Image (cartoon, rainbow, N blue to C red):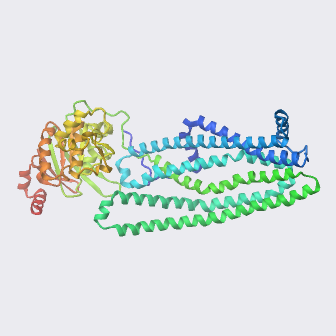
Amino acid sequence: MNRPVVLPGPFAPASGAGSQLWRLAHWLVPYRWRIAAAVLLALLAALMAVLIPVVFSRVVVDDILLQAHHDGVPDLGQRWLVQALAAGLEVTPLAAAGGLYLLWVGLRAVCGYAFETLFAGAVLSALADLRGDLFAHVERLPGAFYDRVRVGQVLTRITTDVESLAEMLIGLAEVAGEVVPLTVAASVMLSLDDTLTAALSPVLLAVVFATVLFRHLSGPVYRRMRDTASRLNEDIHENLSGIEAIQLARREGYNARRFGGLNEANRQVESRAIRIETAYYPVVENLSFLAIGLILWLGGAHVAAGTASLGSVVLFLQFTDMLFRPVVLVGFQASTIFRAAAASERIFRLLDWREALAVPAEPTPLPPGLHGRIEFRRLDFRYETGEPVIHDFSLAIEAGETVAIVGPTGSGKTTLMRLLCRFYDVASGRLFIDGVDIMQIDPGELRRRVGVILQDFHLFPGSVLDNITLGNPAVSLEDARRAAAAVQALGFIEALPAGFDTPLGDRGNNLSQGQRQLLAFARVVALDPEILILDEATASIDPATEAAIQAGLAGIMKGRTCIVIAHRLQTIREADRIVVVDRGRLVEMGSHEALLARNGLYRTLHDAQTLAG
């Protein structure tokens, strides 16, 4: 049997940033041709970016305006091209140069736009796939995962963190698009004036040093900033999800103060990041001004001495920007990159969470006609976050029998249901269905044969019919109507504006609590399961409606194995047997009358409810 591998802590250590980018490539591969086309367009845009200043400085300034052409200075073929255009179009060289300049500017704009559109589209498509895989992964995680990790954390990973990856990839592509102009600029600058290029080297090294220092100082700050923002999102989600309970308990002030603390922690980290950024940007900007001053001083001296042309100095100035821009851009993108790096760590930690229910390599199939005999044999269970809740529990439920399980709050009743539905693994003891060990059955197969009606249920966006069929094509409209009629829900459904096609509001807020509970009944009855579990299923329904439902369920429960978990003892008097549990142990068992006669825990619970009523 395959046992789950459980990583320590809610999110295990993730790999480095480089390996994270490599892992992202898995989702980018399906869009490789779009990315390749985007890269080609980026190279063309980079080539245009190099040719534009060459046309202006070498052709217009030197050749046309000053007529001071230097054969030793490269012009990348632009001088010849201008001459050819002037002759072919019968225009002046200045007009030809102006037209060529506008052509390169236009092509650069078109190629740049096409590159950004194609690349961003590929990135967004890839990350949509990643988000889908992440969502599918968290849906398959067992209940033990959600005992330790808050839903708000998972929500942040799937939404905000994935968006940060998109910003990072697009930012890195922008930096990479500057590499070609940098390489060409450095080569041309060396050929123009190696002395002037050498004089710029210390300034460039200072920019590199400032960028590295900025990244070193800002990296931990951005990670902390991302963590505090994540906690803010989680707190908002948890508070809005439980807004009714908050307002009923008048906890608005307490929650506002708690949120204020988280908000203040985020503000402090954000302020520190801003202080680092505002120190970095002026340094880099002043260093670029220093570089321009050096070029004007040294380059001007060379022009005055006749060893360089004015166009060469102008070209040098323009190429200096290409030389500095990638380095500076890395600094500008640092915040985005570090935010995304922290986000990617959390995403891959979640994807690397290997906890799962144990599923045998060759599960035992359940027969088409399940009898429904259930046996708990010396069962022990504890949640990872708490004390043991089930102790040496043994119980056999015969096929077609209705057994009620009662006991004080926290006695383990719902835990037994969760084990039977395979939300958790049976770690100690055995649990059988029709003689087959439940650990040898595929959980998905088992849940198709066991229907559960919960007190805390969930309604999904969509129509009334959607919430009964749950997208199961095997459940037709007629099946839904029969199920609704069986649980006394058909009347109110047909009275709705569009009947079964009536759209439901958020969590079904356009229905009463009782009506929502009836839909939960109908969706389970429509599946026609062989085993039926009712976990406090009528707690939200008024006594009159409950009596009608009980009458309808009497026919549905006939011939099925049924387990009824209830606090209200008057609802389970007709059960074949009543099982009393206390602190995870079976302490009493028998009929209603026999248990009352024993004067044990059941009698205590019964008398307490009678007095309360």
Q: Is residue 584 left or right of residue 253?
A: left
Say which residue appears at 30% left-offset and 64% top-offset: 247
6 above or below 270?
above
Residue 606 shows in this picture: yes
Q: Is residue 259 left or right of residue 35?
A: left
Work out which residue is located at the far right of the displayed protein and give it. Answer: 305
| Quarter of the figure that contains the N terminus | top left
> How many marks do you count on the picture?
0
- Residue 410, image x and y in percent? 24, 57
- Residue 288, image x and y in percent? 75, 59
- Residue 286, image x and y in percent? 73, 63
Residue 187 shows in this picture: no
Say which residue appears at 5% left-offset and 55% top-offset: 597
Say which residue appears at 79% left-offset and 59% top-offset: 292
95 above or below 475?
below
Answer with the quarter of the image where residue 220 lies: bottom right
Q: Is residue 608 left or right of residue 318?
A: left
Camera-side residue of 282 and 222: 282
Answer with the quarter of the image where residue 609 lies: bottom left
- Residue 115, image x and y in percent? 63, 41
